[in-house]
Amino acid sequence: MIHYELNHVALHVEDIKKSTNFYVNTLKLELMDRPKFDYPGAWFRLGEFQELHLIGERKDPIISCSRNSHFALRADNLDEWEEYFKKINQKFEPRRIRPDGAIQIYLVDPDGYNIELFTGP
């Protein structure tokens, strides 16, 4: 049997500084060392083994919404996240409950990518 494990998600962004600021200061992701590619980018830790890679110099528009292109991060306490987002004036969609009982909120990064924060059943 073949075994797979998610290693990273890559997002093509317009402005690396602006996006890095969002992922560090809004989502509190840990910035990682990144190999010296010949294009701008930033890498972030997502849990123990997964990563988020930002790739700079995007010129094309992004088409993303909560039901199509998005990624989800399991969060410890959505009450705390919602209060934090309100405090920093970060827009997010009101919480909803999935049919399996998971609680979700969505927010959008500077490029228009949707990000789900959830607490699972």
Image: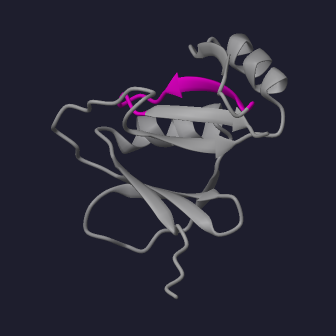
Image x and y of residue 107, in percent: 54, 24
Which residue is outermost to the left? 60
Horizontally, residue 70 falls left or right of residue 75, namely left
Which residue is outermost to the bottom? 1
Q: Picture quarter containing residue 62?
A: top left
Image x and y of residue 117, in percent: 65, 34
Q: Picture quarter containing residue 26?
A: top right
* 79 and 66: which is toward the camera: 66
Is 107 colored magenta in this rendering?
yes
Q: Picture quarter containing residue 114?
A: top left
Q: Which quarter shows the C terminus?
A: top right
Taking the spot 45% from the left edge, 57% from the top edge, the residue there is: 9
Residue 12 vertical placement versus 10 (above, below): above
Tally of numbered discs: 0
Is 61 colored magenta in this rendering?
no
Taking the spot 51% from the left edge, 76% from the top edge, the residue there is: 4
Image x and y of residue 77, in percent: 83, 32
Q: Which residues are magenta?
A: 101-113
